[in-house]
Image (cartoon, rainbow, N blue to C red):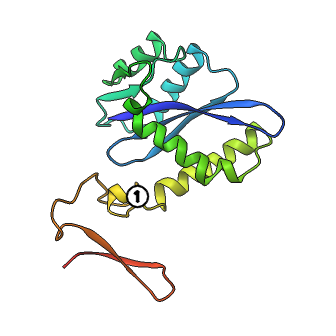
Amino acid sequence: MIATDFACVDTALLARFHVLFVIEVATRRVHLAGITTNPTGAWTTQAARNLLMRLPEDHRFRFLVRDGAGQFTDAFDAVLAGAGITAIRTPPPSPQANAFAERWVRTLRHELLDRTIIWNEHQLWALLVEYVDHYNRHRPHQTLGQRAPNDPGTTLSTPSTPIERVHRRTTCSGLINEYQPAA
């Protein structure tokens, strides 16, 4: 399952950009689909085509969760259906139905956008590419056993017993040294 939404970013020069992204629910891996100042249905459909070309041919995604925004048109759903992905529309007043996408927007704001002055689209794109790379390759996620989404063997699992729980071993400096199953 994957989820998608737009994140709005305001610049110092009072321009507003809309960032379309997709997040894989099981691994928390994020993919940027595009940035625009005017997200129309045609633009969103083309962004979906571009994103599907970057996904592997044997992708395992069957469902995409999206909100009911006007940018997500029937053509957008048809592009996904051509790749074997069924679009699921969330009910209007319930952002918690697309919780993974909403949480990623909050993380993006907290860790990057609230700490950076954005001047233009070029700078925003460069920052987002670097942040998404950090998010996917280096940032630990609690639900992934303190692993990054691109780590080998990363799957969503909830520990059921203390033996299955993963804990961190730290060095004297407090940096993470290695991960080992709890004894």
**Quadrant of the drawing holding the N terminus:** top left
Question: Is residue 112 rendered to the left or right of residue 89?
Answer: right
In-front residue for pair 83/30: 30
The residue depicted at 51 percent of the width and 86 percent of the height is: 173
Within the image, what quadrant is residue 71 found in? top right
Residue positioned most to the bottom: 172
Q: Is residue 129 above or below residue 3?
A: below
Measuring from the top left, give residue 62's x and y in whole percent.
28, 29
Q: Is residue 110 above or below residue 122?
A: below
* Amino acid tagged 1: His
Within the image, what quadrant is residue 168 found in? bottom left
**Residue topped by disc 1:** 141
**Quadrant of the drawing holding the C terminus:** bottom left
Question: Is residue 107 rendered to the left or right of residue 141?
Answer: right
Measuring from the top left, give residue 167's x and y in whole percent.
31, 73
The residue depicted at 50 percent of the width and 30 percent of the height is: 5
Measuring from the top left, give residue 45's x and y in whole percent.
52, 19
The residue depicted at 33 percent of the width and 55 percent of the height is: 143
